[in-house]
């Protein structure tokens, strides 16, 4: 029976018989595009029952890890790459994806196959030479056909296969390259190939304008590990995060600095993030956030200005915008800080994104400081979760946060242990 060609949402994989401008399932605009699925009619199964295995009879298998030789990458992965795993590395153009991949390939050594679907081998070699990568054991395959890639992997048996990028891979009868169907089919083939041949496969992916990974949501479900590189190409720092890891945790982050020789590990992120901090300043405060197993000190800045229009602006960079709105309301109600006619901007310096509520008190303190024009002592570290009633709630890893602050010379702290309400904390500051 001929193949049916439905329309598929790139974000949630919802299917439609005809094109629509807005997906009714996820609400995305402009995400529905032409896809391909098999139109084969379902038939009554004649398969015999499969053989089941009792839980206590299943043999345990330890994942065989190979350290990459890059400490920050191994931290995020949980100790290294697992043989036969499929890893997705996503990030904005120019953020350093290919640079990191080349550095991993250099450290791993052994036979490595680089499938060049976007750039030519000469372009990649030029970048590698600039980074000081010797290229020993590295082979290029300028190809976008997934069948050719699979045959080459089976013949070469590399320890690491790099696919740059998944959006360029073409699967016969699998849909257009870069489309939802094409990406889904290519990822399925690569996952099967990695398990069958036992080669670790690192796939490079792109991100959309809103920061999501380009392609259908099933792309993230099919891979074993999802890594993202965050940062700004105009800033030095890059943050490596794990959004999914079947072989380890997802709470660790790796911190890098983009230098002339590529991505350099930042061994002490707290010191690096605070290196350019000046003395006591209005609207500036240091907080201690815990990323995985280590505490990191970062500077939080706030700025207020008279609203030019009727509705005041609330903007945050590196901090949740909805939480900023909540904190603004709490400060108005319980902190004695008037923000009704002021635009408000909050920024986490260095490009780190803080997604834990422990930064609430620091953000509130920075806002109060800029609104009142009163600086906060630069030797003070502030952290704690704020409730809607203005109370300050306890946060985990209190001792580790304070120990990191003490190590960097902070002599004063405002925490849930020293203040029970926002008003009390602001009075101390």
Image (tube, rainbow, N blue to C red):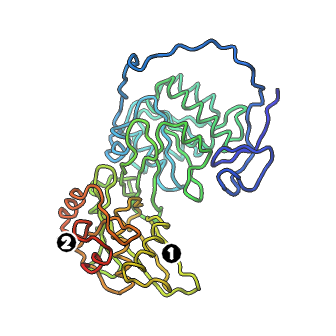
Instruction: Name the residue beneath numbered marker 2.
Output: 412
* Category of crowding for the residue at label 2, using alpha-carbon neighbours closer than 10 angstroms: few (below 14), some (14–19), many (at least 20): some
How many numbered marks are there?
Answer: 2
**Is residue 92 rendered to the left or right of residue 366?**
right
Q: Residue 314 bears which disc, if any?
A: 1
Q: Is residue 343 above or below residue 156?
A: below
Q: Secondary structure at mark 1?
A: strand
The image position of residue 401, as x and y in percent, is: 24, 59
Viewer-proximal residue among 141 and 393: 393
In terms of sequence position, does the residue under pointer 2 or pointer 1 come before the other?
A: 1
Which quadrant: the N terminus?
A: top right
Which residue of the protein is positioned furthest toward the front in this rendering?
Answer: 389
Q: CA distance from mark 2 to mark 1?
A: 30 Å
Q: Secondary structure at mark 2?
A: strand
The image position of residue 33, as x and y in percent, is: 73, 48
Q: Is residue 29 above or below residue 218?
A: below
The image position of residue 156, as x and y in percent, is: 50, 25
* Category of crowding for the residue at label 1, using alpha-carbon neighbours closer than 10 angstroms: few (below 14), some (14–19), many (at least 20): some
The image position of residue 50, as x and y in percent, is: 56, 14
Viewer-proximal residue among 251 and 341: 341
Which quadrant: the C terminus?
A: bottom left
Query: Residue at 56% of width from left, 87% of height from top?
Result: 308
- Occupied quadrant, residue 386: bottom left
Q: Residue 99 bears which disc, if any?
A: none
């Amino acid at each position: 029976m001929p193949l049916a060609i439905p329309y598929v949402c790139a974000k949630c994989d919802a299917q439609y018989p005809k094109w629509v401008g807005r997906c009714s399932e996820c609400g995305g605009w402009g995400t529905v595009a032409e896809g391909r699925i098999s139109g084969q009619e379902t038939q009554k199964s004649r398969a015999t029952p499969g053989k089941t295995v009792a839980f206590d009879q299943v043999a345990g298998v330890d994942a065989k890890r190979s350290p990459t030789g890059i400490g920050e990458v191994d931290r995020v992965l949980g100790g290294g790459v697992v043989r036969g795993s499929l890893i997705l590395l996503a990030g904005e153009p120019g953020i350093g994806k290919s640079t990191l991949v080349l550095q991993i390939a250099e450290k791993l050594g052994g036979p490595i196959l680089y499938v060049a679907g976007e750039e030519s081998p000469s372009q990649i070699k030029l970048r590698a030479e600039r980074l000081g990568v010797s290229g020993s054991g590295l082979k290029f395959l300028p190809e976008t056909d997934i069948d050719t890639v699979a045959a080459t992997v089976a013949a070469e048996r590399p320890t690491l296969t790099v696919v740059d990028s998944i959006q360029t891979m073409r699967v016969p009868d699998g849909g257009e390259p870069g489309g939802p169907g094409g990406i889904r089919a290519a990822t399925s083939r690569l996952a099967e190939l990695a398990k069958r041949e036992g080669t670790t496969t690192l796939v490079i992916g792109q991100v959309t304008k809103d920061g999501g990974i380009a392609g259908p949501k099933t792309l993230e479900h099919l891979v074993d590990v999802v890594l993202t590189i965050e940062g700004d190409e105009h800033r030095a720092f890059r943050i490596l995060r794990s959004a999914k890891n079947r072989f380890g945790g997802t709470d660790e982050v790796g911190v890098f600095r983009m230098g002339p020789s590529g991505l350099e590990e930042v061994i002490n992120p707290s010191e690096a993030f605070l290196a350019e901090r000046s003395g006591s300043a209005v609207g500036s405060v240091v907080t201690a956030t815990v990323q995985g197993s280590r505490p990191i000190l970062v500077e939080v800045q706030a700025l207020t200005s008279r609203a030019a229009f009727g509705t005041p602006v609330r903007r945050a960079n590196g901090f949740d915008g909805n939480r900023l709105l909540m904190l603004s309301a709490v400060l108005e109600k319980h902190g004695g800080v008037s923000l009704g006619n002021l635009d408000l901007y909050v920024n986490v310096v260095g490009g780190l994104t803080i997604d834990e509520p422990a930064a609430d008190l620091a953000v509130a303190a920075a806002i109060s400081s800029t609104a009142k024009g009163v600086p906060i002592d630069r030797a003070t570290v502030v952290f704690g979760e704020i409730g809607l009633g203005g109370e300050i709630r306890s946060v985990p890893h209190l001792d580790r946060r304070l120990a990191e602050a003490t190590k960097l010379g902070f002599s004063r702290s405002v925490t849930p242990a020293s203040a029970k309400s926002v008003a009390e904390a602001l009075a101390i500051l």
